[in-house]
Image (cartoon, rainbow, N blue to C red):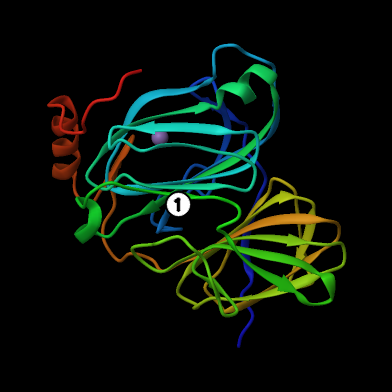
């Protein structure tokens, strides 16, 4: 066991709007300044820090748009998100729930604030993470995993330290419910003040954390504040998170997919030609139909 140390701590960049419903800070790839390869298979991370939305009769969100070649993982911390896609899947996720959509060969979808939440208004906080697919799976059939908070596995830390909620991969011997195409660990770590938890992932895996709430220290030296993103080096396999106050931390670690990345907007493929093909397929209606 050798200690894995932090390469960079990144403050939340200025938010931008995705549609009119998602006010997000883009950490991957925009703020890491090293492209989609650096944190691969995590190729995009948009974080909606906690923000109050006024009541609205018309749900805010983002209208029909395509995706191909990867998965979108949406994690709700506050507020409720509704989703519909051209593969016929739809659902609503609320606090603690996760939606894992495999766009693969292509879907059209739309993402909105859920109607009742929208009418009442309220705090909204979420993460959208894009997980890359290996070439052999990029054109597989679209798929949808709705993972409710009850389905998420839990590991209770000793001495009432808190809980590690495992969405994908594993913590200690507890496996998360999400099916993944390549090895991915994704966990919400909820720590009580003064508690700590140790994490161990293979040294080659790209690894990072996002502080959703609270204030933590990593390896008893580096303080990381709420809404900050910390990206680890590949210099060891183990690190310890210690909570200075009640904290929630999203921890991610994944095996890099050793293939070229060609990305354009909502398409993430391996070559330019495949991007052109994706665009043509969309124009020709091969992503299916979805009403706005
Ligand atoms: Mn989308």
The spot of residue 67 in percent (x, y) is 31, 38
In the foreground, 54 or 28: 54
Label 1 CB less than 8 angstroms from ligand 1: no
Q: Which residue lies furthest to the bottom in this view?
A: 1
Residue depicted at 33% across the width and 34% down the height: 265
Residue 181, located in which quarter of the rendered image?
A: bottom left
Residue depicted at 87% across the width and 62% down the height: 193
The spot of residue 172 in percent (x, y) is 60, 79
Decide: is 11 above or below 291: below
Question: Position of 72 compared to 10: left or right?
Answer: left
- The reply to whether residue 31 is in sight is yes
Element marked by disc 1: loop
Residue 41, located in which quarter of the rendered image?
A: bottom left
Q: Which residue lies furthest to the top in this view?
A: 57
Question: Position of 50 compared to 167: left or right?
Answer: right
Q: Which residue lies furthest to the front in this view?
A: 150
Please identify the quadrant where the N terminus is shown. bottom right
Q: How many labels does the image show?
A: 1
Q: How crowded is mark 1: few (under 14 residues within 10 Å), some or many (20 or more)?
A: few
Residue depicted at 45% across the width and 52% down the height: 34
Q: Name the residue under label 1.
A: 34
- The reply to whether residue 27 is in sight is no
For ligand 1, the image quadrant comes to top left
Residue depicted at 49% across the width and 42% down the height: 30
Please identify the quadrant where the C terminus is shown. top left
Decide: is 156 above or below 250: below
The spot of residue 252 in percent (x, y) is 54, 61
The spot of residue 8 in percent (x, y) is 62, 58
Question: Position of 13 compared to 264: left or right?
Answer: right
């Amino acid at each position: 066991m050798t200690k894995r140390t932090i390469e960079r701590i990144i403050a939340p960049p200025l938010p931008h709007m995705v549609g009119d419903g998602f006010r997000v800070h883009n950490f991957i790839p925009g703020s890491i300044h090293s492209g989609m390869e650096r944190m691969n298979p995590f190729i995009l991370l948009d974080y909606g820090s906690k923000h109050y939305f006024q009541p609205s009769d018309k749900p805010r969100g983002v209208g029909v748009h395509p995706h191909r070649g990867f998965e979108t993982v949406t994690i709700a911390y506050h507020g409720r998100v509704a989703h519909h896609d051209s593969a016929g899947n739809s659902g609503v996720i609320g606090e603690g729930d996760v939606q894992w959509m495999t766009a693969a060969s292509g879907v059209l979808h739309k993402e909105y604030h859920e109607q009742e939440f929208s009418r009442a208004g309220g705090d909204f906080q979420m993460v959208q993470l894009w997980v890359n697919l290996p070439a052999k799976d990029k054109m597989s059939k679209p798929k949808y995993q709705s993972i409710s908070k009850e389905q998420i596995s839990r590991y209770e830390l000793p001495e009432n330290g808190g809980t590690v909620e495992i969405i994908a991969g594993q913590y200690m011997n507890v496996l998360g419910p999400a099916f993944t195409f390549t090895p991915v660990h994704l966990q919400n770590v909820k720590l009580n003040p003064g508690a700590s938890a140790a994490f161990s992932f293979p040294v080659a895996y790209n690894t990072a954390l996002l502080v959703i709430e609270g204030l933590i220290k990593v390896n008893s030296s580096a303080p990381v504040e709420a809404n900050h993103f910390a990206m680890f080096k590949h210099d060891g396999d183990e690190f310890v998170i210690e909570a200075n106050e009640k904290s929630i931390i999203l921890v991610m670690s994944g095996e890099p997919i050793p293939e070229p990345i060609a990305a354009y907007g909502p398409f993430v493929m391996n070559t330019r030609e495949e991007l052109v093909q994706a665009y043509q397929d969309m124009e020709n209606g091969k992503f299916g139909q979805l009403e706005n």
